[in-house]
Image (tube, coloured by chain):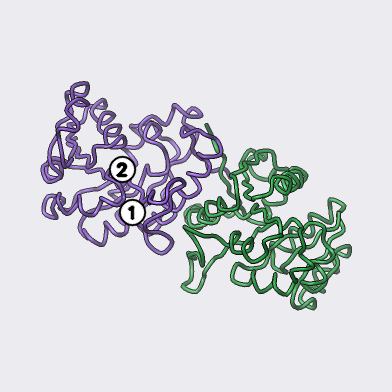
Chain colours: A purple, B green
Amino acid sequence: MKMGVFGSGSVGQTIAARLAELGHDVMIGTRDVNKLKEWQSSNPSVKLGSFAETASHGEMLFNAVSGAGTLEALKMAGESNLGEKVLVDISNPLDYSKGFPPSLLVSNTDSLAEQIQRAFPKVKVVKSLNTVTAKIMVRPREVANGEHTIFVSGNDADAKAQVTALLRSFGWNDILDLGGITSARGTEAYLLLWVRMYDSLQDSMINVKIVK
Amino acid sequence: MKMGVFGSGSVGQTIAARLAELGHDVMIGTRDVNKLKEWQSSNPSVKLGSFAETASHGEMLFNAVSGAGTLEALKMAGESNLGEKVLVDISNPLDYSKGFPPSLLVSNTDSLAEQIQRAFPKVKVVKSLNTVTAKIMVRPREVANGEHTIFVSGNDADAKAQVTALLRSFGWNDILDLGGITSARGTEAYLLLWVRMYDSLQDSMINVKIVK
């Protein structure tokens, strides 16, 4: 499948490399492709392009831009290129302006995912993967044999089904549909707990398993 | 040990009954003791009193008042009665004014626990138990054989050690110290995720287990 990944940071690189490994035709969208030239030399099947080229390339899209940069990047991608595509929003609206631990740029009664959905009403935004570090996103079985939970939030049931299938291809088994896109408030706010767990355990290779 | 529990709702009742069962000398503090007369008839060892009487009675105190009512209740309890005691803050600053799911009255860069700590600097506030439903708080082994996580946050190490010992007496094994009282921002914000998990699973007898 043709995949477009916005963002050249570690999350974007990790998602793109894993998608390519699984046989997808992947392009990373970034402001400055030169930043990724060296990375690309060890990931030669991944194309590099502008945000607009990447939005046009992908049948499914991934937002791995920083929370603060997301809306501007998506505007550069262009509403017509985004169309009615599925956009997996992995980003967290973290504010590191006062150091660690970060706070959130948007929270409680709103979320970054909802901001994206309002700005691009036709795009099928699905929030997912934002609750774990990049390595776990794409290889969940490296932690606790994969026995832990990942969440999906979104307004479009078919889009969530497509994303759920993709998550299964990454190795996820325990996938909880939290409901509409407003439920991204929950997984984004969870970052305020995640950073404290990370700080206490001094380990980013962590996740939670819902038990009943 | 002499225990004082502020709040006559289901959390206060559940904590008080469990403490009494474990042999503690328990008083519930409430604005209107008449509300609890019937409940007391099946929990005869639990005393009823005003917030001030309960603060005076308890060597360890528990805040199970609603988030919105907490600071006023603690003012009624009285700074001199609260003294330098350990106060386990179980409350969440939930705002149901727009229905379900609730938002938070305070979040992100502050928390109810910090508001309490600022208002009563000598009190040893320990945030805990606010991430699970009342039944699980006091009987964690009723879910997944107790294999799930509870958090403590607070500025005083000895107070956290005392609360941790009490949690063990309830049946908790997996207790994570998140750090100072500001880390209560994490567990309070987690409620925004908890209400969505509850809504999706239609089950309040849930918790999370941290896996590595």
Position of A42 compared to A150: left or right?
A: left
Position of B76 compared to A140: left or right?
A: right
Mark 1 residue type: Gly
- Residue density around tag 1, few if under 14, some if 14–19, many if 20 or more, within 10 Å: many
Element type at marker 2? helix
| Residue named by callout 1 | A154
Indicate whether A210 appears above or below B92.
Answer: above
Image position, residue B9 (x, y; %):
69, 68
Q: Residue at x 27, y 58 (%)?
A: A117
Q: Earlier in the sequence, mark 2 or mark 1?
A: 1
Q: Nearer the viewer, residue A156 or B87?
A: B87
Indicate whether A40 appears above or below A119.
Answer: above
Q: Nearer the viewer, residue B163 or A109?
A: B163
Indicate whether B91 appears above or below A146.
Answer: below
| Residue named by callout 2 | A163
Residue lying at the far top in this picture: please name it.
A42
